[in-house]
Image: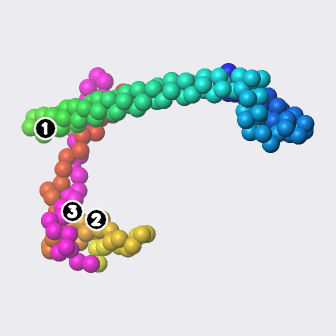
Amino acid sequence: MSDTEYALRRETDAARDLIQALRTSGEGDDAELVADTIEGETNLREAIGVALEEIDEWTVLHDGLEAKIARDQTRLSIIDKRVDRVRAAIERALIASELPMPLQLPTATISLSKRKPQAVIDDEALIPARFFTQPEPPAPKLDKKALAAALAEGTLPGAHLDNGSVSLTVRRK
């Protein structure tokens, strides 16, 4: 419990005790008397003021951290894109150089592998209904694995297979 919370609780308890004492004496129905007694006998107003100032400080910190997180997310995205570009450059270099795989380096072992062709959607409306599933909530979802398997056997309207891609694997030592 913070000092602010403790002070607020202590002053609240004191105010409650005063209200109970006023009610016991028969004067607890006079709202003005109760308010004046609480203000004169406790530091509840001041404790509430301090609590509001603390809330303001925490709000400023919260807003600052949110801004920093947003900035850091942007920086992280930039770094991820750089990593992707460098990985693609390594892939292109390995393909062009036709070096034997795996390539042993002092800090890593690198290899290329060919990925299976994937389904490319040209026009989803032309794809036969048998390739759609009905998940919860009811919205048709395309089963891309079944579509790719069917495309491997022949052509279908609305989709085709790409040429496959190359995948770079880096194993660190």
Quick check: is 57 in the magenta stretch? no
Q: Residues within 10 Å of mark 1 (few under 14, many from 20)?
A: some
Q: Which mark sits nearer the N-terminus, 1 or 3?
A: 1
Q: Residue furthest toward the bottom?
A: 129
Q: Mark 1 belongs to which amino acid?
A: Arg
First reached walking from the N terminus: tag 3 or tag 2: 3
Can you name the residue that lies furthest to the left here?
96
Question: How crowded is the residue under tag 2: few (<14 C-alpha within 10 Å), some, or many (20+)?
Answer: some
Task: Give the quadrant of the C terminus.
Answer: top left
Left or right: 36 as drawn, with respect to 79: right
**Residue 99 appears anywhere in the view:** no
* Residue plotted at (19% across, 73% down): 125
Residue identifier under label 1: 92
List the residue tagged with mark 3.
119
The residue stretch that appears in magenta: 104-129
Q: Nearer the viewer, mark 1 or mark 2?
A: 2
Residue at mark 3 to residue at mark 2: CA–CA distance: 7 Å
Residue at mark 2: 144
Q: Mark 3 touching mark 2, by CB under 8 A? A: yes
The secondary element bearing badge 1 is classed as helix
CA separation, marks 1 and 3? 23 Å
Question: What percent of the width, then of the height, locates residue 69?
Answer: 38, 31
Looking at the rendering, which quadrant does residue 124 occupy? bottom left
Pointer 1 or 2: first along the chain: 1
Q: Secondary structure at mark 2?
A: helix
Query: Which residue is at 66% across, 26% downward?
Result: 45
